[in-house]
Amino acid sequence: MSLTITPLSAALGAQISGVDISQPLDSEQRDTLEQALLQHQVLFFRDQPIDPQQQARFAANFGELHIHPIYPNVPEQPEVLILDTAQTDVRDNAIWHTDVTFLPTPALGAVLSAKLLPAFGGDTLWASGIAAYEALSEPMKQLLQGLTATHEFIKSFPLERFGNTPEDLARWEEAKRKNPPRSHPVIRTHPVSGRKSLFVNEGFTTRINELSDSESEVILKLLFAHATRPEFTLRWRWQTNDVAFWDNRVTQHYAVDDYRPQRRVMHRATILGDVPFFR
Ligand SMILES: O=C(O)CCC(=O)C(=O)O
Ligand SMILES: [Fe+2]
């Protein structure tokens, strides 16, 4: 079986075939996938029925795994979180976001497995921050590269949606206390490829620190719209047992909320990242 990589769009995305990710990878497969991720930013695999243990093992090829502060997880494999519309309000994913940028070290990437899908809808889109950065004018790049922005947990996880029971409220309050606002560079240099990427997202970014309130508001609005232009995105139509693996350092994504009340169940393993920097 030889591993093949088929690019899916100009900005990002490739489909991978010829590898069974339920099995341990050899070092050549691992390195090929890592290189493909660096180049294509999001990889898709079809027909990969993986259990939570296999999913965690696959993800752990690329770094240590993160346990999410809010989402429920698979009890015997807590590194795998469950996005089940019958269990959790997942509407906060229907906004363009990069995962967990409220952490000092936002995720390197994530591996998402489609378990149960609605008859229609429930696609996910990804956008390339590299393509977005590269399309900015030189003066705009110059302005942004010296700036930092604040990212806040509560922007996507507001109390109204997560404080329904005393237990939920306690969990939310603890998560909020442990995740105060964080600053990250507005332009991020990829720690491995060295490519530059726009690193603000509508899900969590609240403020460009060095600008005035009104400047920050207008520039962020512009950047959120720019980052998600169709030219920089790809839309994935899921089939059961598809797996997506994205580089969370240079992408954003959006889970389309167009299928309720049908049920949709996804499993995600999240890989810990490093401190974002600009160089
Ligand atoms: O459900 C999806 O398709 C993606 C949800 C999401 O934002 C995530 O898993 O990080
Ligand atoms: Fe997400």
Image (cartoon, rainbow, N blue to C red):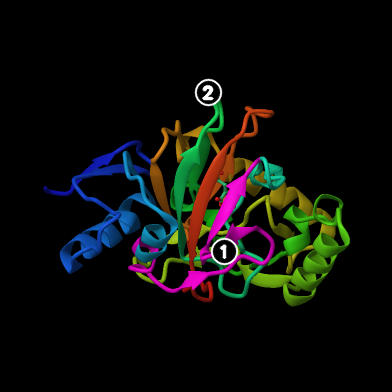
- Number of numbered callouts drawn: 2
User: What residue is shown with label 2?
Assistant: 119
How far apart are the two marked residues, 1 and 2, measured between alpha carbons?
28 Å
Q: Is residue 213 visible?
A: yes
**Direction from residue 217 to residue 4 in the image, left or right:** left
Question: Seen in the image, is 70 located left or right of residue 50?
Answer: right
Q: Residues within 10 Å of mark 2 (few under 14, many from 20)?
A: few
Residue 75, numbered label: 1
Tag 1: amino acid: Pro
* Mark 1 crowd level (few <14, some 14–19, many ≥20, 10 Å Cα): few
Q: Is residue 196 magenta?
A: no
Outermost residue to the top: 120
Whether label 2 lies within 8 Å of ligand 1 gets the answer no
Is 213 left, or right, of 67 in this rendering?
A: right
- Classify mark 1 as within 8 Å of ligand 1 or not, answering yes or no: no
**Residue 43's spot in the image, x, y percent?**
35, 48
Residue at the location (26% across, 60% down)?
A: 35
Specify the amino acid type for callout 2: Ala
Q: Is residue 79 on the magenta stretch? A: yes
Instruction: Please name whichever residue, 177 or 151, is drawn nearer the observer in this view of the structure.
Output: 177
183 lies above or below 2: below
x, y (%) of residue 267? 51, 51
Position of residue 217 relative to residue 273, above or below, is above
Q: Quadrant of residue 176?
A: bottom right
Question: Residue at (46%, 74%) from the top-left corner?
Answer: 279
Q: Position of residue 30 (x, y in %)?
A: 24, 63
Q: Which residues are magenta?
A: 58-85
Q: Does dot 1 land on a helix, a strand or a loop?
A: loop
Given residues 152 and 94, the one toward you in this image is: 94
Quadrant in which residue 263 is drawn: top right
Residue drawn at point x = 54 percent, y = 50 percent: 252
